[in-house]
Image (cartoon, rainbow, N blue to C red):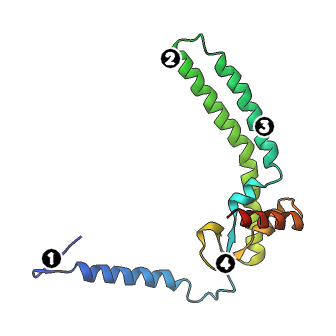
């Protein structure tokens, strides 16, 4: 966006002023907060979800439901193309809803555990570990423990995931 005032382009001045204003607002809230008081914590959310104690059962249930639906799709062979397509879409929707019903309680439990660990650590911000280049306090192990794993099991999973990177 360019503004012409007296024949001069003020684009550069506006960009610099806007940038300065954004930086002032961004740092104004942080200036009075010591870093140690409100640490930024990180969590390997994908690892916590994938290795959650209830995930294997949920995946087995989803797989079993998929097999039932696969058989139902075979039963659509004699239907008209439109009816067949409609039936397949209904089955897909059912499978999606079933999968969500199986995994949503796990995600809710993990989110609750993350909130609890954040509170214990005095953190105000949690960031997905993969998005952080440096810094932050990793709470992945604490969350895994809250989700029912032993400290040794949690550490083993974390070590294995590091080897895979």
Earlier-in-chain disc, 1 versus 2: 1
Residue 44 falls left or right of residue 151: left
Closer to the camera, 38 or 75?
75
Q: Name the image quarter holding residue 57.
A: top right
- The residue at which mark 3 appears reads as 61
State whether residue 128 appears in this view. Answer: no
The residue to which callout 1 is attached is 4
Residue 86 to residue 26: above or below: above
Q: Which residue is mark 2?
A: 82
Does the residue at mark 1 contact the one at mark 4 (Cβ under 8 Å)?
no
The answer to whether residue 60 shows anywhere in this view is yes
Badge 4 marks a residue whose secondary structure is loop
For marks 4 and 3, give the CA distance: 36 Å
Q: Report crowding for label 3: few under 14, some 14 to 19, many 20 or more residues within 10 A (C-alpha).
A: some
For residue 136, which numbered disc appears in the image? 4
Q: Position of residue 70 (x, y in %)?
A: 68, 25
Q: Earlier in the sequence, mark 3 or mark 2?
A: 3
């Amino acid at each position: 966006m360019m503004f012409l005032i007296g024949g001069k382009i003020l684009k550069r001045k506006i960009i610099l002023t806007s940038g300065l204003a954004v930086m002032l607002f961004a740092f104004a809230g942080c200036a009075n907060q010591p870093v140690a008081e409100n640490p930024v914590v990180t969590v390997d959310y994908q690892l916590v979800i994938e290795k959650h104690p209830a995930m294997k059962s949920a995946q087995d249930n989803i797989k079993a439901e998929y097999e039932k639906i696969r058989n139902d799709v075979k039963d659509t062979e004699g239907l008209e193309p439109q009816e067949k397509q409609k039936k397949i879409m209904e089955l897909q929707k059912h499978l999606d809803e079933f999968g969500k019903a199986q995994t949503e309680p796990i995600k809710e439990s993990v989110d609750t555990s993350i909130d609890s660990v954040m509170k214990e650590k005095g953190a105000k911000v949690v960031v997905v570990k993969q998005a952080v280049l440096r810094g932050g306090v990793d709470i992945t192990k604490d969350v895994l423990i809250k989700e029912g794993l032993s400290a040794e099991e949690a550490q083993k999973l974390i070590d294995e995931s590091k080897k895979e990177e």
